[in-house]
Amino acid sequence: MENVWQHFVFQRDQFGERQIWIDGVLIASAGGADPLDSFDGIITIGAEGPTLANSFAGRIDDFAIFANTLSPEQIMELANGANPPDLISPPVPFIITDIDHDTATGVTMITWNSRANKTYAVDASDDLSTWEELTDSVASQGETTSFNTFPAIGTPRRFYRVREVQ
């Protein structure tokens, strides 16, 4: 298969139980492994040792090391695109961080903290009661995302909200 991303989890607990998960599904497990050696800060990814033996012809998009084994729910979250640090600490609160209105052009730029591989909707209201969806297809731009809009002419004030839709 070409150009198909898969999510892998390889883990071993303190009792020697080993597991392999692919795309959130446990596909192999076995007990009886020796305890892990203390981590010395050196790791080779995608090949074996300094000779690069047993290398693979592929690409790695994300890589994370956890101090403890993950639960099946955490593994499924990762397979579905969760940000690894969010599993061990609360994610950054989802908030609008800036609204900048340029009176010369009439453009209002809304910026919020975002997560990779997510899609957002932006809504607007004149009274905080009735909301109009401006778009539901703003792709994440990384840690922050911005969207430009033109407020309705004659509107003395405008309120905005952002929703994560995917």
Image (cartoon, rainbow, N blue to C red):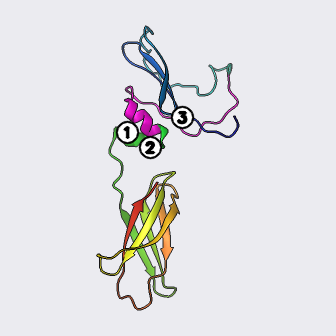
| Residue 56 is covered by the magenta coloring | yes
Q: Earlier in the sequence, mark 2 or mark 1?
A: 2
Up-down: is 156 above or below 78?
A: below
Q: Nearer the viewer, mark 3 or mark 1?
A: 3
Tag 2 near tag 1, CB within 8 Å: yes
> Relative to 126, is 120 above or below?
above
> Residue at (35%, 88%) from the top-left corner?
156
Judging depth in this view, the residue of 82 and 67 nearest the camera is 82
| Residue located 52% across and 33% down the image | 23
Q: Position of residue 14 (x, y in %)?
A: 37, 16
Magenta range: 55-78
> SS class of the residue under badge 3?
loop
Prevailing secondary structure class for the magenta stretch in the rendered image: loop
Instruction: Give the residue pinned by disc 1.
Output: 87
For the residue labelled by badge 1, is the local secondary structure a helix, a strand or a loop?
helix
Of pointers 2 and 3, the one earlier in the residue sequence: 3
Q: Amino acid at mark 2?
A: Ala
Left or right of 159, for residue 43: right
Quadrant (top left/top right/bottom left/bottom right) for the N terminus: top right
What residue is disc 2 on? 82
Query: In the rendering, at what x and y percent does residue 59 appear?
Result: 65, 36
